Image (cartoon, rainbow, N blue to C red):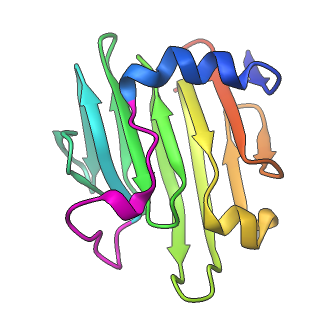
Amino acid sequence: MTLIKLPSVAAMLLVLAPFTALVPATSIAAPIPDNAAGIIKTATGSVTIERAGRKTAGTAGAVIMPSDRIVTGADGGAGITLRDETRMALGPNTALEMEQFAFNSTTHEGKLGASVRRGTLAVVSGKIAKQSPAAVKFSTPSSVLGVRGTEFVIDVEGSGE
């Protein structure tokens, strides 16, 4: 069963706070490559990036590409900042698939598509959602969420795989 919890965003952000530093992308020391979606700001426990059939450790500073899958273990959590300053906190046992990311830093136009296969994801939307809300979509195994606000939490129960 998929639950999309909107009223308790503040509570969920507090629960996921240990897994992310919700700070603007502009504070990132190294610039994020133009072809990348973002960067892992914080990582705790088991975090893995799956890219083109290969798995690598998801450590702080690791680059996230538009087609990556980020998986956290039972003890894992991650804070990700995308190039448009979207901030995401992945809780334990979460699988997030980045399906699409494009961003023009001059016009703030772009597209963001991601799928939460299982687990919990808290999001604070960035410049793409502010410029073009219809260009941001998050999906779960049973629903699609079009972003119209700035903060939300997705909780997918079960394996979702």
Give the residue drawn at x 71%, y 35%: 152
**Residue 160 in sight:** no
Which range is magenta? 20-36
Residue 90, given in percent of the width and then of the height, sits at 45, 30
Residue 102, given in percent of the width and then of the height, sits at 53, 74
Residue 45 vertical placement versus 123 (above, below): above
Give the residue drawn at x 33%, y 58%: 27
Residue 111 vertical placement versus 138 (above, below): below
* Residue 134 relative to residue 23: left or right: right
Most common secondary structure along the magenta stretch? loop
Quarter holding the N terminus?
A: top right
* Residue 14 relative to residue 75: left or right: right
Give the residue drawn at x 66%, y 29%: 154
**Most extreme residue toward the bottom, as rendered?**
106
Q: Quadrant of residue 113?
A: bottom right
Residue toward you, 55 or 26: 26
Give the residue drawn at x 77%, y 51%: 147
Residue toward you, 160 or 108: 108
